[in-house]
Amino acid sequence: MFESALKGFLEGINHFSAGQAVMILVGILLIYLAIKHGVEPLLLIPIGFGAILVNLPLTELMKESEIWNEKGLLRIIYEAGILTEIFPCLIFIGIGAMADFSPLLANPRILFLSAAGQFGIFLTVILALQLGFTKLEACSIGIIGACDGPTSIYFSSRYARDLLGAISVAAYSYMALVPIIQPPLMRLLTTRKERTTRMDTLKVSVSTPVKIIFPIVVTIFTCLIAPKGAPLIGMLMLGNFLKESGVVQRLAQSAQNELINVVTLLLGICIGATMSADIFLKETTLKIFALGLVAIVLDTVCGVLLGKIMYRFSKGKINPLIGAAGISAFPMSARVVQREGQRADPQNFLLMHAVSVNAGGQIGSVMAAAIMLSTLSGMGIIS
Amino acid sequence: MDDNLKFGLALAVIGMGGTLVTLSVLGLLAGLLKKIFPF
């Protein structure tokens, strides 16, 4: 009797594997990076804690079952929020409500430059395919180049569920590493003369009707071009419309605060819960991290190169550095451009131009994902 | 050329071209909005 009671008491320890120990250390590492270095703490804290929880033996938090109330707690949240794609879409409402497209609207032609910041997505897909990933897995990995966590989660939860944990962690980690990844590339690809290019002062004054109508125009236009992206772009623009309409401040405030906070918590812990040792500790995870880095490098390279083309066409009026801000990591990328510009010329102020491109990158990343979805649908790869 | 490479290249051309054209048109539409509603 005493022996069996002791066996039950120690059952968890008896089932503890080396892989689970490694994953618990990974969870602790994510929490450390979030607390000590401020790396995306809103996401990495719940992800790290979720990774610890799910790797403790016999907890059954992700237990699968045909019977609803026999499923694990995190499995229920995961199926309700991630497999249904509700969480990333709700996050987009919050992001839209927080986004300010005024700098972009002040200089709308610059939106063109934000497109190059998405090229890394598509180029990385080719590389991922060559490394043996399936078509849909390769597309989900390429989306890391959007530098947009919710889009990555939306895509991988639909088309590469086994890779969801690795793709999400890679996406958020690289977003936080933008200030380290981009500057050397920017310096490598531009001459000192190009970096010291001063641009005219940008007046960020846009009329209220423009700000109100813009999200409606974007929604209608984008959904006509790429209807499969409607959940992404529709929710992003709904959030922005709540804010800009000016008559539903309570809803806008809720989207910016309560909604996004609660969903971020649940989303983070569910992503962590997908990081069990048997799924995460594979060679595939290393490949995903390598490809994610390549995607962001290619985004930056393409953005700066298009900036250089615009520099030539504008006869030296556009600083090519602002091309690097065409990714969705807002406002980090714009700050990097400002810092690099001032490194070459301390009196050079590129911030507002970079913010314009960076705001365009927020729309561009979702647009690129929407176009990818519609293209895949057109090819008959998704229904 | 294998099927995967064909797929990747097709997606890259349509994806990058589509994103560039769509964002450029959106930029033009935003510019038009500014002209219709200057202040």
Image: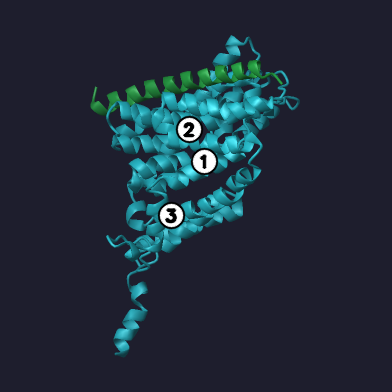
Chain colours: A cyan, B green
Q: Which residue shows up at 59% across the image and 21% down it?
A: B30
Residue type at mark 1 is Phe
Helix, strand or loop for disc 3: helix
* Among numbered discs 1 and 3, the one appearing first in the sequence: 1
Q: How many marks?
A: 3
Name the residue nearer the viewer: A120 or A268. A268
Q: Give me the chain letter of mark 2.
A: A
The reply to whether dot 2 and dot 3 touch (C-beta < 8 Å) is: no
Give x and y (percent) for residue A34. 56, 53
Q: Which residue shows up at 38% across the image and 42% down it?
A: A156
The reply to whether dot 2 and dot 1 touch (C-beta < 8 Å) is: yes
Question: Quadrant location of the C terminus of chain B?
Answer: top right
Give x and y (percent) for residue A313. 58, 10
Q: Which mark is residue A76?
A: none
* Marks 2/3: CA–CA distance: 22 Å
Q: Which residue shows up at 27% across the image and 29% down it?
A: A380
